[in-house]
């Protein structure tokens, strides 16, 4: 992977709604309502905080697709950091 490819991925990630993102699935984390991705909320923050981002609703996504998308917001920056670390050796 080239440095330019890494930068393009990093730039796309930086343009997204701030993280962390959390997948909330009806019947798993929430009792009723729609499954969605909650954005911009930290573990210690109240889910009703007006600091968090807009919820993301996905049409036609499976639970595992939604979980993957939500985790990608945290996973991609970690992977980029690790790639840069390994390339700098």
Image (cartoon, helix red, strand yellow):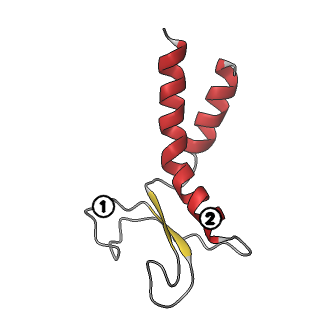
Taking the spot 50% from the left edge, 38% from the top edge, the residue there is 77
Rendered residue at 49%/91% (across/down): 32
The residue singled out by tag 1 in the image is 43
Q: Quadrant of residue 67?
A: bottom right
Single out the residue that lies furthest toward the right: 60
Q: Tell me the SS state at disc 2.
A: helix
Q: Are marks 2 and 1 in contact (CB under 8 Å)?
A: no
Asked which secondary structure carries label 1, the reply is loop
Q: Is residue 69 above or below residue 3?
A: below
Indicate which disc, 2 or 1, sits on the residue closer to the N terminus: 1
Closer to the camera: disc 2 or disc 1? Answer: 2
- Crowding at dot 2, Cα within 10 Å, few <14 / some 14-19 / many 20+, comes out as few
What's the CA distance linking mark 2 and mark 1? 21 Å
Q: How many marks?
A: 2
- Residue lying farthest top? 89
- Can you identify the residue that label 2 sits on? 64
Determine the residue positioned at 58% across, 43% down: 13
In x, y percent, where is residue 75?
Answer: 51, 44
């Amino acid at each position: 992977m080239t440095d330019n490819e890494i930068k393009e991925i990093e730039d796309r990630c930086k343009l997204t709604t701030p993280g962390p993102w959390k997948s909330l699935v009806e019947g798993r984390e929430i009792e009723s309502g729609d499954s969605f991705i909650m954005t911009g909320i930290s573990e210690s923050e109240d889910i009703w905080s007006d600091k968090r981002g807009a919820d993301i609703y996905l049409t036609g996504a499976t639970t595992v697709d939604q979980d993957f998308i939500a985790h990608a917001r945290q996973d991609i920056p970690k992977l980029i950091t690790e790639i840069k670390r390994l390339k700098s050796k």
